[in-house]
Image (spheres, rainbow, N blue to C red):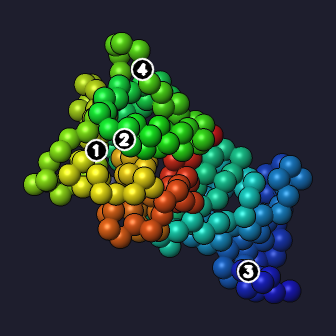
């Protein structure tokens, strides 16, 4: 029988770990287990799952079907975490997370900056795994402030200083003319860097440029990369 998503079978059904079942198709796999139901694993994700030893490895069985998440990428949640195709390109080698928190110190003069930063923090905190919070008097991981630098080309910038507090700057030379949504997006994007996310593509908050980015809220690949790095 032809499966609508995956084409014709390439194998007979076979027995998998703990009395599950698997079957290969032209475009991927279908795996079934009594705990997780029948799930479609499309070929690009199956390659990553295979490299992690299928259901026998740390990922275990799939608990959802393969999803398209933007930038031509796929993601899929398994019992042991999430797999994301091309994930290597979307993770920074550094971040500002310390003990599953980012404790920040913010210094703004403009109420619009205060509002935009508050909303950006709230947006990432809905993801739950890392708590971004205002720090006490000492011991912060990140400072956030405004600059006014018309000769620079950035609207916002994240810099990682290793063991010292990292920094996010909002460049008012540009952002004073932005809408409130655009200012919030600048902060959501820079805070994404502080969470260890690298640039992706224009459909995502982590798209590289204010002028080409189309997203105004967190998108599927933004979320998938965060989940891959930090879990739930
Ligand atoms: Zn950036």
Q: What is the CA distance from the residue labelled 1 to the residue labelled 2?
A: 8 Å
Residue occupying the far right of the picture: 34
- Towards the viewer: 57 or 214: 214
Q: Are marks 1 and 2 in contact (CB under 8 Å)?
A: yes
- Near mark 1 (Cα within 10 A), the count class, few <14, some 14-19 or many ≥20, is many
In the rendered structure, the answer to whether residue 228 lies left or right of residue 6 reads left
Q: Which residue is mark 4?
A: 135
Q: Which residue is mark 3?
A: 5
Q: Which residue is mark 1?
A: 170
Please tell me which residue is depicted at 78% across the width and 64% down the height of the picture.
39
Q: What is the CA distance from the residue labelled 3 to the residue labelled 2?
A: 46 Å
Relative height, residue 122 to residue 228 (above, below): above
Relative height, residue 107 to residue 181 (above, below): above
Q: What is the CA distance from the residue labelled 4 to the residue labelled 1?
A: 19 Å
- Quarter holding the N terminus is bottom right
Please tell me which residue is depicted at 83% across the width and 71% down the height of the picture.
13
Q: What is the CA distance from the residue labelled 1 to the residue labelled 3?
A: 45 Å
Comes first in the chain, label 4 or label 1: 4
**Residue 15 visible, this angle:** no
Q: What is the CA distance from the residue labelled 3 to the residue labelled 4?
A: 49 Å
- Near mark 2 (Cα within 10 A), the count class, few <14, some 14-19 or many ≥20, is many
Label disc, if present, on residue 113 of the rendered structure? 2
Q: Are marks 3 and 4 in contact (CB under 8 Å)?
A: no
Label 2 CB less than 8 angstroms from ligand 1: no
- Judged by depth in the image, the label closer to the viewer, 3 or 2, is 2
């Amino acid at each position: 029988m032809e499966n609508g998503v995956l084409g014709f079978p390439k194998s007979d059904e076979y027995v998998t770990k703990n009395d599950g079942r698997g079957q290969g198709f032209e475009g991927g796999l279908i795996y079934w287990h009594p705990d997780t139901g029948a799930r479609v694993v499309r070929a690009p994700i199956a390659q990553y799952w295979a490299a992690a030893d299928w259901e026998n490895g740390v990922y275990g069985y799939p608990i959802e079907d393969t999803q398209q998440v933007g930038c031509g990428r796929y993601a899929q949640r398994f019992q042991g975490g999430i797999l994301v195709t091309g994930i290597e390109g979307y993770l920074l080698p550094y971040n500002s997370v310390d003990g599953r928190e980012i404790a920040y110190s913010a210094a703004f003069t403009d109420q619009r900056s205060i509002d935009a930063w508050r909303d950006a923090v709230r947006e990432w905190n809905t993801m739950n795994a890392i708590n971004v919070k205002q720090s006490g008097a000492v011991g912060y991981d990140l400072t956030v402030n405004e600059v006014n630098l018309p000769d620079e080309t950035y609207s916002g910038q994240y810099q990682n200083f290793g063991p010292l507090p990292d920094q996010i700057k909002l460049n008012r030379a540009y952002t004073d003319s932005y809408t409130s949504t655009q200012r919030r997006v600048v902060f959501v994007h820079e805070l994404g860097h502080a969470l260890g996310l690298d640039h992706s593509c224009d459909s995502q908050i982590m798209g590289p440029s204010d002028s080409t980015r189309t997203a105004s809220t967190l998108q599927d690949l933004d979320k998938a990369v965060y989940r891959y790095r930090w879990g739930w």
